[in-house]
Amino acid sequence: GTAVADAVCARFDKQATTVLCGPGDNGGDGYVAARLLKDRGWPVEVRNLGEPATQDAQAASARWSGPTKPLNGVLEPGVWIDALFGAGLSRPLEGPAAAAALAMAETPERVVAIDVPSGVPGDTGKPLGPAACASLTVTFHAKKPAHLLEPGHGRCGEVIVADIGLGVTDSKTMENGPELWLPRFPWPTAASHKHARGRLVVVSGEAWQTGAARLAARAGLRIGAGLVTVLSPPEALPVNAAHLEAVMLKPFETDLELEQAAKDVDAAVIGPAAGVGEPTLLNVLALARTGAALVLDADAITVFREDPEELFSLLDRDDVLTPHPGEFERLFPGLLAASPERITAARTAAERAGAVVLLKGSDTVIAAPDGRCAVNGNGSPWLATAGSGDVLSGFIGGLVAQGMESFEAACAGAWIHTEAAELHGPGLVSEDLPGLAPAVLRRLFDER
């Protein structure tokens, strides 16, 4: 309750405030916040949804001496503190609670939610019915899935995590951010040389679909890989050669020649505009025989839609799959729809595939076969443009090539990808992204 009162005072000027209190402990927190705001001179009124039903809520209510009225779904001007229901909600809102939630959804800029906006279950982020929206959510100890997964994420506004003294808990689900992987980021040293910084190859498509591979290759180079080569069908060589400088170029005609060309590399990216046909399938098999860590995207995923198990038999924990939801469905039919949320789906997929799975979206989820899972909380709408996924594959491949553990490389690549997009903002096209990465890297280097 103190954390909520402090947040309200920091965010808003002193004004009329209505605290909406439910019958449980979430409502109890509301009574505490109401009392503390009143003590600080704020004009506060409580609207309750019946009498407190838990011992803690009753104790908090007993210390509240201000005006209390029944909740009727009509909210007065001013700040609204949503203390109706918290993260444990398991049923749809009804009656006055539903009416109040709909009113809060219309003007979220005036709403501060305690734990989660009412109507949003904490474990999935998927409203079961009417649900509130807030400009600020104050939660406790750690973020819940609802704070990171859509549509809950979009309903929470800014999220403040208040320390309530619970200490460290062991969880394999995390919010993706630099604190997760920056201590192990592969920065070069004074003794580094280009061969030591990792060798990455990217497989090009045919002559008329070469751009995606070049985007991935440039991304791999910008993220720090020392040597990046586009492996190209002969007819695509002139097109690729006309657009590449620091990225090298090497031809191959058959899957056996591809295997030979990639025999000494650290990581390989295949899939961007590779084509959905037998050549791509054979090329994936060839790269798997080299022992290089694989980053598979787009067509390299779709080509196994008839027999996902064939792909899974090739993969190990160093490999990374980067599907969007449609591609995810091709490898894991029905899994996304059958899962309560994207975390469970991605984690199950990673275990089944035996590889890291990055499930793209505004709330990108990265899962490892050992159960670790991270959710990207910094999604950017500017990434909704053709080719941005190819750049992401290159970022991840470049980090893996430098020796970064694949789960952490996927997490770092996704976060840097989004930060680069936010640096540019409106008008972003995928060609911009590799060139924006150095500014993000500079910031990370200074913060390390």
Image (tube, helix red, strand yellow):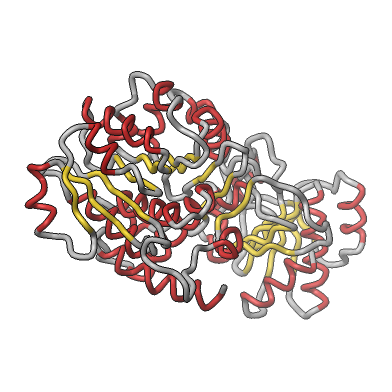
**Depth check: 160 or 209 in front?**
209
How many numbered markers are drawn? 0
Image x and y of residue 203, in percent: 25, 44
Quadrant where the image shows the N terminus: bottom right
Where on the picture, by quarter, is residue 245? bottom left
229 relative to 437 in the view: left or right: left
Give above or below for 67 relative to 279. below
User: Residue at left 44%, top 69%?
Assistant: 192
Residue 405 vs residue 390: left or right? right
Q: Give the quadrant of the C terminus.
A: bottom right
Q: Nearer the viewer, residue 390 or 119?
A: 390
What is the x, y in percent for residue 264? 35, 46
Residue drawn 84% across and 61% down?
Answer: 165
Query: Taking 38 as reference, is 374 above or below it?
Result: above
Residue at image coords 55%, 55% = 176
Across and down, in percent, residue 258 comes to 25, 38
Measuring from the top left, give residue 175's x and y in whole percent: 59, 54
Residue 205 visible in the shown view? yes
In terms of image quadrants, where is residue 28?
bottom right
Q: Which residue is at 39% across, 68% downward?
A: 193
Q: Is residue 386 left or right of residue 65?
A: left
Q: Is residue 154 visible?
A: no
Nearest to the observer: residue 47 or residue 284: 284
**In the visual, does 275 lie left or right of 227?**
left
